[in-house]
Structures are given as structure tokens and as C-alpha cells.
């Protein structure tokens, strides 16, 4: 599967956390956590449409100022999501600046903020032209795991325990569309931007019997196809990619259970590994995971790939030891799935994805 999303940590493992997730072939990105984002180029920061903040400890939220600075004066909507208390934290940041000129910008920025609680979320809207003074009270909406959804993917959150509420996130494609090169060649088609429109039509679940027009630019005339027939010739539908992000969590029973359920079946899990197991007591005191604990969780959840990050600076020069400890625990727990856990997990989610992919394939035939 050629992935649609290429997530990358914005900094080295000893620096502020943040996962940048650009979309393939689109001028767009998501970000999980807003630590120091200065390592990202402004053109990449400006791709961000939705930012998801695990909690507002400074190392996870200081990048908001940089984000706001670059977006100011642009006609953009930026959506941000954070844990309980997020509206107050965000309003505090906005209150730190003077906005007497903000209503003069030609292109007004607007912020849509969601504060996520276990059962509901509070949403509030702030506009540059109102000098970021909210004009309405927060609106309460139900929350049952999904924070944001589009035809192609969804972002979910889980509320975890870091002695304060801390959110874990996952991004999941509903299904994945691979373009079959030999199918394109057989139809005399060349790849190009038209494939984005074709994929979008499938993600939008457009009627397979409808006409799809492929445009190739000025040099070549457009061609028309029956969408379902074209899909049958050039597309292979497979289960979608899942990327998960877990940081700043205690290793208690409730967190273990929630994390494994939440990240199971991920293609790629990014998980904190702040301390070595030999310093487990410090990890407990500071409400973080050890590398071994991170690996055990990843193994139990059967993730396909794991990246550990958020290392304590006390291990400078020992990063390979942290990675190795996590890897060994991951492998041991993939082999012996019951070790250190007293609950089981199933494969329902992958099953659902597989069914969804199959039903779409059937519809396109
Ligand atoms: Zn942290
Ligand atoms: Zn923290």
C-alpha cells in the first residue's frame, strides 16, 4: 500500500513533541501537538487545517503562538482541539496580545476551538475581525470518540490520565485507493492531477453508474468514463491506513486498557518513552511511560510499526538504549500477548475496515 499520509515527528526525540501529517498530493496537513514548531517551514505550517493538542503543558502548546503568527492576516479557518480547560488556556494566549488593528486585515482568520471532555465537547468560534473576542457562548456537542470526519478519513481521540486529562489521537483512512499502473496503461491514460478527482469521487461514494470526466490539461482532450467501470480497471481498494499518537500518560490499568483498545491495528504508532525501565519510579512520579511500557503497549495492540519519542534529557547519548528497550518489550509482547495484561483485544476494527473496502469494491463493479 502506498500511504496517503506521511507522518513525521517535528523535532528530535529529546525536543518538544509534535507529529506533522501532510496529505499526499494536497496542500494540506494535520498536526498532533503543538510543541516548538520552528523546525517546520512556514509553507508547511500554513498547510495545517486542524491542530490537535494532547494537553497544555508548555512543551505541547508553545507552538500555538507561531501558528497564529503565520496565519494572521490570511483568509483561513483553523480548527484546534484540546483537553478540558482548553478554551480558557486558548483565551489566555489570545489575551496576551493587543488586537486593536486586527479588524483592519483584509483577510480575516477564524479559529474554531473544541474542548474535549469524556462525554461531550465545547465548541467556540473566534474571529480576527472581532479581535478574537468570542461572540457566542460555547456550544455543547456530544462526543463519542470521533473528533473530526471527512469522506476520506476521520480523527478520533481518547481521554487519558496524566494526573490531568490528556488526549491520545488517531487518524484513520476509511479505505485506501491504490492506482493500478497496468490498468492506466491499458486504457492509454497518464497519471496526473485528475486522479485526485477520481479518488475523491470514490471517497465521496459517488454513484458508480455516473459519468466521470478525466481532464488532462490543454494538450489532450478530456475523456469520459463510467465511474464504477473505471474504478474496476484502475483502482484497488484496500483497508485504510491508521496512525496513532500517544504521549504523556501514566502506566495505570485504565490507561493501559484504553490505549490498547484505541491504537490496536495501527499501521504506525508514535508513543512516548520518557524514561528507561530502571528509572520506573521517576516515571511514576512524573506520570510518564518507560520505554519498556511503551513497547509492551505497542506489542499488545499489534501495531505494525512503532516510533518512540519524548525522551528525558537525562538520557542524552543513550537514545539507542531507549529504542532497544522499547523494541524488545514490543517483540516479547507480540509473541506472548497476555504478559502483564489482564484484558484481551479483538480484530473487529480491522474486520470492519476490510468489510468496508470489500463493499466499496462490490459497488464499483
Ligand atoms: Zn510532555
Ligand atoms: Zn505533560
Image: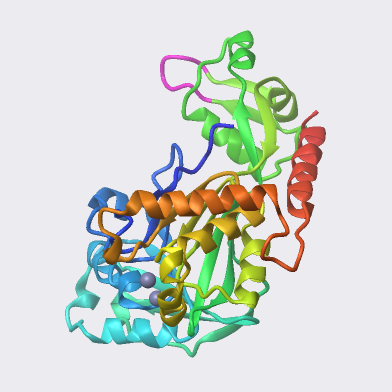
**Residue at the farthest bottom position:** 137
Q: Position of residue 143 (x, y in %)?
A: 64, 76
Name above or below for residue 28 compared with residue 293: above
Q: Quadrant of residue 93?
A: bottom left
Q: For the point 67% across and 23% down, which residue is it?
A: 225
Q: Which residues fall within the magenta stretch?
A: 215-221
Q: For the point 63% across and 11% down, which residue is it?
A: 187
Q: Position of residue 157 (x, y in %)?
A: 57, 68
**In the image: residue 291, left or right of residue 231:** left
Residue in front for this viewpoint, 237 or 151: 237
Q: For the point 69% across and 33% down, which residue is it?
A: 237
**In the image: residue 245, left or right of residue 36:** right
Residue in front for this viewpoint, 43 or 187: 43
Residue in front for this viewpoint, 154 or 35: 35
Q: Quadrant of ligand 1?
A: bottom left
Name above or below for residue 132 compared with residue 246: below
Q: Quadrant of the C terminus?
A: top right
Q: Residue 230: in sight, yes or no?
A: yes
Q: For the point 47% across and 14% down, which residue is it?
A: 220
Residue in front for this viewpoint, 279 or 299: 279
Q: Quadrant of residue 155?
A: bottom right
**Is 26 within the magenta?**
no
**In the image: residue 75, left or right of residue 357:** left
Q: Position of residue 362 (x, y in %)?
A: 82, 34
The rendered magenta stretch, by its main secondary structure, is classed as: loop
Q: Quadrant of the N terminus?
A: top right
**Is 219 within the magenta?**
yes
Q: Position of residue 175 (x, y in %)?
A: 66, 43
Q: Residue 29: in sight, yes or no?
A: no
Amino acid at each position: 500500500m502506498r500511504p496517503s499520509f506521511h507522518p513525521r515527528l517535528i523535532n528530535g526525540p529529546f525536543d518538544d513533541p509534535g507529529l506533522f501529517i501532510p496529505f499526499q498530493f494536497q496542500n494540506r496537513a494535520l498536526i498532533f501537538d503543538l510543541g516548538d514548531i520552528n523546525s517546520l517551514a512556514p509553507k508547511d505550517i500554513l498547510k495545517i487545517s486542524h491542530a490537535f493538542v494532547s494537553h497544555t503543558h508548555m512543551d505541547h502548546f508553545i507552538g500555538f503562538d507561531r501558528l497564529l503568527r503565520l496565519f494572521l492576516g490570511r483568509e483561513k479557518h483553523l480548527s484546534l482541539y484540546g483537553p478540558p480547560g482548553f478554551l480558557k488556556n486558548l483565551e489566555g494566549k489570545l489575551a496576551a496580545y493587543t488586537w486593536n488593528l486586527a479588524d483592519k486585515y483584509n483577510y480575516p482568520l477564524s479559529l474554531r476551538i473544541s474542548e474535549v471532555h469524556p462525554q461531550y465537547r465545547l465548541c467556540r468560534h473566534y474571529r480576527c475581525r472581532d479581535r478574537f473576542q468570542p461572540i457566542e457562548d460555547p456550544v455543547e456537542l456530544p462526543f463519542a470518540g470521533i473528533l473530526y470526519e471527512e469522506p476520506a478519513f476521520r480523527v478520533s481521540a481518547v481521554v487519558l490520565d496524566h494526573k490531568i486529562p490528556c488526549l491520545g489521537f488517531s487518524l484513520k483512512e476509511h479505505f485506501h485507493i491504490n492506482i493500478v499502473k497496468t490498468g492506466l496503461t491499458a486504457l492509454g491514460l497518464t497519471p496526473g492531477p485528475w486522479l485526485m478527482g477520481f479518488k475523491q469521487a470514490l471517497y465521496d461514494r459517488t454513484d458508480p453508474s455516473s459519468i466521470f470526466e478525466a481532464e488532462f490539461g490543454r494538450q489532450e482532450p478530456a475523456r469520459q468514463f463510467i465511474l464504477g467501470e473505471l474504478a474496476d480497471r484502475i483502482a484497488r481498494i484496500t483497508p485504510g491506513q491508521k496512525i496513532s499518537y500517544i504521549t504523556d500518560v501514566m502506566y495505570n490499568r485504565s490507561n493501559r486498557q484504553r490505549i490498547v483498545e484505541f491504537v490496536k491495528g495501527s499501521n504506525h504508532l508514535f508513543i512516548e518513552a520518557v524514561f528507561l525501565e530502571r528509572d520506573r519510579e521517576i516515571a511514576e512520579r512524573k506520570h510518564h511511560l518507560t520505554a519498556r511500557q511503551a513497547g509492551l503497549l505497542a506489542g499488545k495492540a499489534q501495531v505494525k510499526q512503532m516510533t518512540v519519542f519524548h525522551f528525558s534529557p537525562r538520557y542524552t547519548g543513550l537514545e539507542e538504549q531507549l529504542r532497544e528497550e522499547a523494541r524488545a518489550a514490543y517483540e516479547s509482547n507480540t509473541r506472548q500477548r497476555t504478559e502483564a495484561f489482564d484484558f484481551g483485544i479483538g480484530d473487529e476494527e480491522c474486520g470492519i475496515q476490510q468489510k468496508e473496502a470489500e463493499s466499496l469494491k462490490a459497488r464499483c463493479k
